[in-house]
């Protein structure tokens, strides 16, 4: 670990970053994309722009009430035995009725998506849209409990890596203004790592810490469990986050018309109505809760109104009034998710997320570059006959065997993370455009294309030399993004026609994909043309010294 405090921090920074770096890069990339989760979902459901009923314009209270009534009617027919109904009401970003219901623990939930004007199944393609990337960001497409624990552990290690990195680089702010492209590759990668790390360092610290706090109750539930004897809903109610829960009466009841409740709720709260939850819909103690979008601001809190489901009377209004600790928590959540951000600030968050991804990526590449065999001087062949027998045993101990395989594995994982993950996202978009609309399990097939591409790029990186694998992966990624734009233009022509109708975000989406294709193409071209720094021919004595250095550990760039 070293003898000084800074050397110990350098060791901690290097190994903590490497151990979880590949997972962190996936978290950063998908989290950055999630800032435009609604736009991705809308792009992946192009049929929403073709229907007059699903035009995306804000709905009047009467239209929202009628849509809610259609949703309740569908749930009564198809989910009468469920204990909880959720109705996602149409919004400009998602102009459909999203129905979701739970029956009992251990039973898969039900789901349906309806046209809010007719109540019929919406004629849109089956896809997870931006929700897949959003949930992958904190669940890694694993069972929620396992995925969130892994992400939380990686976030904690990320915080350690950030703090130890600041301590390690004594000239970090001076190095920020330096990018030495003509020096050794290790020096260039370290400069790039410093620039992307320091430029957005406040963002990196904020997003990592708030990400940990977001799931803090799951990591440390003992206080709530002890104080409330496992009744977490009571804790959330007393802290002002949800209305007071109501136990089922165990007696049948008839749900009151939902339309008047929706109109009254929208007349009480000025924010857009986002969803309804109906607990125990066929019980005498049924509760209907109207949940609104959070007001503009840092705190991520949703105003809520609870109704008696049988009488339709208002039971409780939750609008503000959070306890100080709960408000602190919701503010940290709001900072992390950036729901408060307008277009300009959202772009800034997106760019900072890209720099965070680049910081992790350059750190991973730097680790492997620092451990490559040192370049041999031009005059070295003259000294090989005399020095090679002595040097080879030591060199083979460092570059061969398990060490060599370990380095090859790290390089392949780097290629899979840095180039394979963007390629997988492009394949996810491409599958959305190319898979048959009537394909059963279409959403799962899109996700399958994502993981298949990611795994293929990673495995292919083990088949050949590292430099050739990097070039092939970057070129393939650029080609995939170009293919996505081509497929979109060929199969969905109304995106570009919508530019005149105020739907410019679809054009910007394709333009962003083109920019990513160009970025990866430029990176592949730079790699193909890179010849390395030129060195003057040393004297024979220096050549023998250089050969001796081959068997010794390379100098640290730090």
Image (cartoon, rainbow, N blue to C red):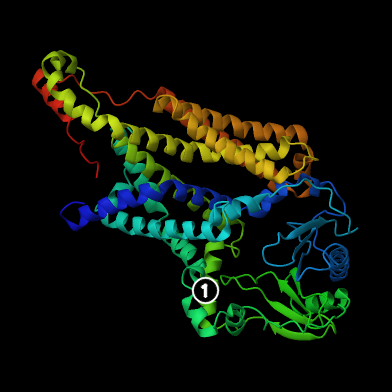
Residue 525 location (% of width, % of height): 47, 26
Instruction: Tell me the crowding category of disc 1: few under 14, some 14 to 19, or many 20 or more residues within 10 angstroms, Cα based.
Output: some
Q: Which residue is mark 1?
A: 329
Apparent side of residue 317 relative to residue 153 in the rendered image (left or right) = right
Q: Is residue 304 visible?
A: yes
- Where residue 181 sits, quadrant-wise, is top left
Apparent side of residue 161 relative to residue 140 in the rendered image (left or right) = left
Residue 423 location (% of width, % of height): 56, 36
Give SS at disc 1.
helix
Say if 223 sits above or below 509 in the image.
below
- Where residue 101 sits, quadrant-wise, is bottom right
Residue occupying image coordinates x 20% and y 28%: 395
Q: Residue furthest right?
A: 118
Q: Is residue 35 visible?
A: no
Residue 368 location (% of width, % of height): 33, 37
Say if 316 sits above or below 460 in the image.
below
């Amino acid at each position: 670990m070293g003898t000084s405090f800074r050397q110990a921090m350098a060791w901690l920074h290097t190994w903590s970053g490497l151990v979880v770096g590949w997972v962190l890069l996936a978290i950063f990339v998908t989290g950055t994309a999630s800032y435009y989760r609604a736009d991705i979902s809308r792009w992946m459901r192009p049929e929403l722009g073709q229907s007059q009923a699903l035009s995306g314009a804000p709905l009047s209270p009467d239209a929202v009430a009628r849509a809610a009534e259609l949703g309740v009617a569908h749930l009564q027919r198809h989910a009468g035995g469920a204990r909880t109904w959720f109705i996602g009401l149409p919004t400009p970003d998602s102009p459909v009725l999203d129905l979701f219901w739970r029956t009992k623990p251990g039973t898969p939930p039900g789901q349906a998506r309806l046209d809010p004007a007719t109540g019929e199944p919406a004629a849109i393609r089956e896809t997870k849209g931006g929700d897949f990337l959003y949930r992958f960001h904190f669940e890694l497409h694993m069972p929620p409990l396992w995925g969130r624990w892994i992400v939380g552990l990686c976030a904690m290690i990320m915080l350690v890596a950030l703090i130890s990195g600041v301590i390690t680089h004594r000239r970090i702010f001076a190095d920020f203004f330096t990018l030495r492209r003509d020096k050794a590759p290790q020096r260039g990668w370290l400069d790039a790592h410093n620039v992307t790390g320091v430029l957005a360092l406040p963002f990196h610290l904020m997003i990592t810490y708030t990400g940990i706090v977001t799931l803090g109750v799951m990591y440390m539930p003992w206080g709530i469990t002890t104080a409330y004897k496992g009744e977490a809903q009571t804790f959330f109610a007393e802290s002002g986050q949800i209305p007071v829960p109501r136990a089922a009466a165990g007696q049948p009841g008839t749900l009151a018309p939902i339309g008047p409740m929706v109109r009254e709720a929208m007349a009480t709260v000025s924010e857009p109505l986002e969803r309804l939850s109906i607990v125990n819909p066929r019980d005498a103690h049924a509760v209907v809760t109207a949940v609104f979008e959070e007001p503009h601001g840092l705190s991520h809190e949703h105003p809520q109104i609870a109704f008696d489901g049988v009488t339709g009377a208002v039971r409780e209004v939750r609008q503000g009034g959070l306890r100080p600790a709960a408000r602190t928590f919701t503010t940290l959540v709001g900072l992390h998710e950036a729901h408060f951000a307008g277009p300009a600030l959202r772009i800034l968050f997106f760019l900072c997320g890209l720099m965070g991804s680049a910081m992790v990526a350059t750190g991973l590449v730097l680790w492997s570059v620092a451990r490559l065999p040192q370049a041999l001087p031009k005059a070295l062949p003259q000294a090989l006959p005399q020095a090679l027998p002595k040097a080879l045993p030591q060199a083979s101990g460092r570059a061969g065997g398990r060490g060599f395989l370990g380095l090859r594995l790290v390089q392949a994982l780097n290629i899979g993370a840095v180039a394979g993950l963007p390629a997988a996202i492009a394949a996810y978009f491409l599958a959305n455009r190319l898979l048959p609309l009537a394909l059963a399990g279409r959403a799962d097939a899109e996700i399958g294309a994502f993981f298949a591409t990611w795994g293929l790029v990673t495995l292919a990186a083990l088949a050949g030399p590292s430099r050739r694998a990097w070039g092939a992966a970057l070129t393939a990624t650029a080609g995939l993004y170009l293919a996505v734009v081509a497929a979109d233009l060929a199969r969905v022509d109304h995106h570009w026609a919508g530019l005149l109708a105020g739907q410019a975000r679809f054009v910007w989406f394709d333009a962003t994909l083109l920019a990513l294709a160009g970025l990866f193409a430029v990176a592949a071209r730079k790699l193909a043309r890179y010849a390395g720094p030129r060195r003057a021919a040393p004297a024979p004595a220096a050549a023998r010294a250089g050969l001796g250095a081959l068997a010794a550990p390379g100098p640290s760039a730090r």
